[in-house]
Image (spheres, helix red, strand yellow):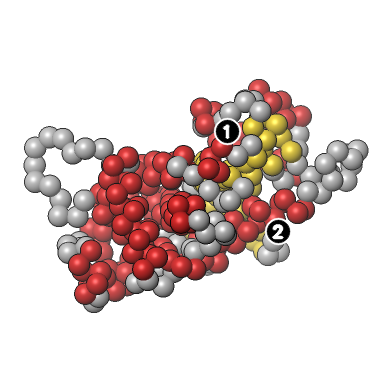
């Protein structure tokens, strides 16, 4: 474990324990591994690139340094169940971290959708518990079809997640993003700029974003008059965010097979990225989304 990762986990634990996890009330014995410790452990798992929970638990138990920080660890099944039960706290922690960073007050937000594959074979599709939730979609970036879900993400310019959701790829992108914005309308400031892809064109979607106080910016389509151009230099921001999720945080190798499992593991990766950005703001690192100091 590097000194930077140790510092991040310690500061993250304190923040989560103070502002995310509610005080324990009622009778009963306190758990040997608190929710704050569990969430901190889940972030460390993603940053150190252990997609397998079984391998992660085995790694922690074989390291004296980790055992000092987490003297008690449940079995893999217990760790998995508890992590799924605290998924609301994972989402809350992302927002708490976002509100602690200067990028929370940025005037420009970026929105995009990216595939989250959940199966590679026809037998998986037929037997998976994700049947009815996942579906077939097309990934234009890799020119391939996939079976799974699609992650819709609205983030600040530095990649800090603001709002997100998972949806069936067969659903229209404009309809899903519109529902996401309406669901989180309390986070939108009047005059906020939302930079989206040209796939989010449409009079109805433009009117909806305007009603929410958003100014929608997107690349011009070929059949439209010139307004903003292709915005390629700015669109690279969200593409680099997706690359961080897939390349460094193994979004496409989540390994989940149930709706709750996929939601939890995607939230786990978004929280890990948010924690890295937050710590880089705190320590003055120039590249806010750099996770190199924490991945070993």
**Residue 250 spot, x, y in % from top left:** 49, 65
Label 1 belongs to which residue?
181
Q: Label 1 neighbourhood size at 10 Å, few (<14), some (14-19), many (20+)?
A: some
Q: Residue 2 lies in what quarter of the image?
A: bottom left
Earlier along the polypeptide chain: callout 1 or callout 2?
2
Please tell me which residue is depicted at 60% across the width and 39% down the height of the picture: 106
Residue at the (45%, 52%) spot, across then down: 282
Q: Tell me residue 132's x, y (percent).
A: 49, 47
Which corner quadrant holds the C terminus? bottom left
Image-based side of 51 in relation to 57, left or right: right
User: What residue occupies the far front of the structure in this picture?
Assistant: 284
Disc 1 secondary structure class: helix
- Front residue of 192 and 270: 192
- The answer to which image quadrant residue 24 occupies is top left
Left or right: residue 103 compared with residue 27: right
Report whether 41 appears left or right of 23: right
* The label number, if any, that marks residue 140 in the structure image: 2
């Amino acid at each position: 474990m590097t000194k930077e990762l140790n510092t991040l986990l310690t500061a993250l634990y304190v923040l989560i324990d103070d502002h995310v996890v509610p005080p324990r009330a009622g009778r009963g014995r306190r758990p040997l591994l608190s929710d704050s410790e569990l969430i901190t452990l889940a972030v460390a798992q993603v940053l150190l690139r252990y997609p397998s929970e079984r391998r992660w638990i085995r790694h922690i138990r074989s390291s004296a340094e980790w055992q000092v920080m987490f003297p008690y660890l449940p079995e893999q099944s217990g760790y998995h169940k508890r992590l799924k039960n605290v998924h609301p706290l994972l989402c809350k922690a992302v927002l708490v971290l976002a509100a602690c960073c200067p990028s929370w007050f940025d005037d420009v937000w970026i929105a995009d959708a990216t595939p989250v594959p959940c199966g590679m074979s026809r037998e998986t599709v037929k037997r998976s518990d994700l049947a009815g939730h996942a579906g077939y979609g097309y990934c234009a970036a890799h020119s391939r079809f996939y079976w799974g879900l699609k992650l819709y993400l609205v983030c600040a310019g530095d990649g800090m997640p603001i709002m997100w959701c998972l949806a069936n790829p067969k659903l229209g992108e404009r309809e899903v993003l519109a529902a996401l914005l309406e669901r989180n309308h309390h986070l939108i400031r009047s005059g906020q700029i939302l930079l989206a892809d040209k796939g989010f064109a449409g009079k109805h979607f433009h009117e909806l974003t305007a009603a929410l106080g958003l100014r929608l910016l997107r690349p011009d389509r070929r059949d439209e008059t010139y307004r903003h151009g292709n915005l390629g230099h700015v669109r690279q921001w969200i593409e680099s965010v997706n690359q961080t999720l897939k390349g460094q945080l193994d979004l496409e190798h989540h390994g989940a097979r149930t709706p709750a499992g996929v939601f939890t593991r995607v939230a786990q990766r978004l929280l890990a990225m948010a924690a890295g950005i937050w710590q880089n703001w705190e320590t003055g690192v120039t590249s806010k989304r750099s996770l190199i100091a924490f991945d070993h």
